[in-house]
Amino acid sequence: MTAPLLQLRDLRVHFRTGRGGLFRRRRILEAVGGVSFDIHRGEVLGLVGESGSGKSTIGRTLTRLERPTGGEAIFEGTDILALTARAFRPLRRRIQMIFQDPFASLNPRLTIEQTLAEPLFIHRLARDRSEARDMIAETLELVGMDPDAMKRHPHEFSGGQRQRIGIARVMIVKPRLVIADEPVSALDVSIQAQVLNLIKKLQRESGVSMLFISHDLGVVRYISDRIAVMRRGKIVEIGDRNRIFDSPRHDYTRRLLASIPRLPPAPN
Amino acid sequence: MALLEVRDLGLAIAAGGRLLPVVRGISFAVEENETLGIVGESGCGKSLTALAIMGLLEDTAIRITGGSIRFEGRELLTMAPAERRALMGNRMAIVFQEPMTSLNPVYRVGDQIVEVLRQHRDLSTSEARERTLRLLEMVQVPEPEQRVHSYPHQLSGGQRQRVMIAMAIACDPRLLIADEPTTALDVTVQKEILELLQDLQKRMGSAIVLISHDLGVIAETCDRVAVMYRGTIVEEATAGELFANVAHPYTRGLLASIPPADRDVEWLEAIPGRVPAVDQEIPGCAFHPRCPFVRDLCRTARPEGRDFAPGHSIRCHFPREWRT
Ligand SMILES: Nc1ncnc2c1ncn2[C@@H]1O[C@H](COP(=O)(O)OP(=O)(O)OP(=O)(O)O)[C@@H](O)[C@H]1O
Ligand SMILES: Nc1ncnc2c1ncn2[C@@H]1O[C@H](COP(=O)(O)OP(=O)(O)OP(=O)(O)O)[C@@H](O)[C@H]1O
Ligand code: SF4
Ligand SMILES: [Mg+2]
Ligand SMILES: [Mg+2]
C-alpha cells in the first residue's frame, strides 16, 4: 500500500487575543487542538463542522499562511511545517489553495493572461511567453472558458466565471494537493452546480488530492470520498462519505445532519 | 395594509453616461408576521433591491429610475433623509451579505453594537454593554465577554456573520431584511439563527425579507417566495404552492441543481450557459438563451406577469412544459 500524500499529525494552532482594551488581558485561544488525518493520492477529504472550529485555520496552516504551535504535516515524506521558507519554496507549487471569494483573490489590474502567467514563471513551468500562452489557453478550455478571456480583466466576469479563473490558476501549476475553502458558497445554485461538476471532473482526470471545506453538506457529499467532522478545534468523527451520512457515530454529527434544511419532496 | 410595499421599482447602473437597467420594475409586499423569501441568480438585483429599501444607494453608481417603496404606509423615496436615517437600524434593519465589508475593521465588535444601541435607544453605556452581551449570547457567539473585544478580522467567517445579526436585531426592528444571513454558518447554528429570527417575528410582529441561494432554507422559513431572474420576478407563490407546483423553467432548473444530502449523485443537473452581462439586451424572455423549453415566441415576446394558479403568478409563455 502506498503512503498517504499527506499525514497530518497532532496539529495545534493557537492565537493570542484580547490584547489591551478594557480588561488588558491577554488570552490564548486554541483554534486547532490536536488534529490528525491522512489524505491519500487522488482522494478528496471533505471537512465540515461548527463554524469557528478551526477548518480554515488548518487550510491556512497547510499553505503556510499561519504558523502552527505544534504538530507535523508530512507531505510526500517531508514535514512541511518544519521547513524554512526557503526550503519550502520548491514545494509551494504542489500545495495550492482555492478561496471562497474569487474576486478578492484576483488582482483587478492584471489581465487573465497576466494572472495565469504569473505562477507559470514563478515556478518556471514555462520558458517564454508563447509557451505560457499555449498553457493558459489550454487551461482556460479545461475550465470551460473561451481562451479569448485571456485579454480581459476580472471585473468583466461573473462570480461563476471568476471562480473558474481561480480554479484555472490553481490547476495550471499541476498541484498534488488542493485546499478549497468554501469554493462555491458565493455562487448561486445553478452556477454552483456547473463549478462543482467542473471540480469533480478535473479532480478525477488529474488525480489531484483535495481538502474540501464547506458548510453545505450536500456539496460535501457530492465531492468527497471521506469526510471529517470538526468541533471546537478537534475532529469528532472521520470516515467514508456514506458511512458518515448513513450511520453517523458522534452525537454532533447526528445533530449536524438533522439540521440540514430540507426541501419538500418533489411531487413529480 | 402591508408593512412594506414595493411597487414597480426600477434600478439602473449609471455607467459611461448611460443607465443600464438592473431591476426592471418589481413589485411585492410583505405583511406583519410574514416572511418573504427572495431567490435568484447571482447579479439579478436582490441585494440592490434590499439597499434601495434601506435607503443605502446614495454615493453609489445605482439610480432609482421609478416606482415606490412604502413602509408602514409612508413613502420612503420622498422622505426627508434625516427622517429616513432615524428609521434605519431602528424600525427597519438589514443583515448585509458581506459582514467583512459592513463591519468597521478598526473598531472592536462590541463597541460597534453598543454604538447602534446608543444611537437609537436611551441607554447608559453600561446598559448598552449589558444588552450587547445578551445579544451576542442570543446569536450564539461563544464566550461573548471575550469576543466583544475582538476586531472583525479576529473572528471566523461565521462569528462575523453572527455579530452582524446581533447588530441588526439590537433595536427589535419591525422590518428585517436578511441578505444571505446564514451562508457562512454551519447548519446547526444556521437553524438556531433562523429560529431566533422567527422568535423576533413572533415577539414584534416583524416582517422579514430573507434573501438566500439556499432553497432548503427558503422552504423551511418563508411564507411566500419570489424567484428573480435578471431584474424581474419570474415566479411568486406561497412556499407550499411553489414547491408543490413549480411552474417556471428557471425555478425548476434551480431545484434540479441542488446537490442532495440524502443520497449520492454522480453529476449535477446544472442550468447550461450563464447569466448575460448587464449591458447585454435580450429580446423576448430574458431566460430564453438558457431555457430547455424555449420556443419561437420566447425569443421575441417578453412574457407578462399572469396568474398560473390562485396566488401563484408567473412570467413565462409555456409554464410547466415538462409535464407534457
Ligand atoms: N488571526 C486570528 N486572530 C485571533 N483569532 C483567530 C484568528 N483567526 C482565527 N481565529 C479564531 O480561531 C478560531 C478558528 O477560526 P477558523 O477561521 O479556522 O474557523 P472555521 O472553522 O473556518 O469557521 P467558519 O466555518 O466560521 O469559517 C475562531 O475562534 C477564530 O475566532
Ligand atoms: N455599486 C455598484 N456599482 C455598479 N454596479 C453594481 C453595484 N452593485 C451591484 N452592481 C451590479 O448590479 C447587479 C445587481 O447586483 P446585486 O448585488 O443586487 O446582485 P444579487 O442579486 O444580490 O447577486 P448575488 O446573489 O451574487 O449577491 C450586478 O450585475 C452587479 O454587478
Ligand atoms: S417564456 Fe419561454 S424561454 Fe422564457 S422561461 Fe418560459 S418557456 Fe422558457
Ligand atoms: Mg472558515
Ligand atoms: Mg447579493
Image (tube, coloured by chain):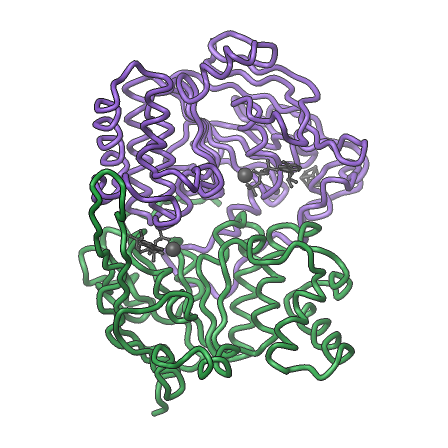
Chain colours: A green, B purple
Q: Residue at x 18, y 56 (%)?
A: A251
Q: Is residue A87 above or below residue B170?
A: below
Horizontally, residue B208 falls left or right of residue B257, namely left
Residue A118 is situated, as x and y percent measured from the top left of the image, at 65, 71
Q: In this view, does B89 lie above or below A62?
A: above
Q: Is residue A143 above or below residue B286?
A: below
Q: In which quarter of the image is residue A246?
A: bottom left
Residue A217 in sight from this viewpoint: no
Residue B124 in sight from this viewpoint: yes
Residue B13 is situated, as x and y percent measured from the top left of the image, at 70, 32
Ligand 4: image quarter: bottom left
Q: Which residue is drawn at 49% across and 43% down?
A: B213
Q: How many labels does the image show?
A: 0
Query: Which quadrant holds the C terminus of chain B?
Result: top right
Q: Quadrant of residue B190?
A: top left
Horizontally, residue A132 falls left or right of residue B314, namely right
Horizontally, residue B275 falls left or right of residue B252, namely right
Q: In which quarter of the image is residue A80?
A: bottom left
Q: Which residue lies furthest to the bottom in this view?
A: A1
Q: Is residue A86 above or below residue B151?
A: below
Residue A15 is situated, as x and y percent measured from the top left of the image, at 28, 58
Q: Residue at x 56, y 44 (%)?
A: B252
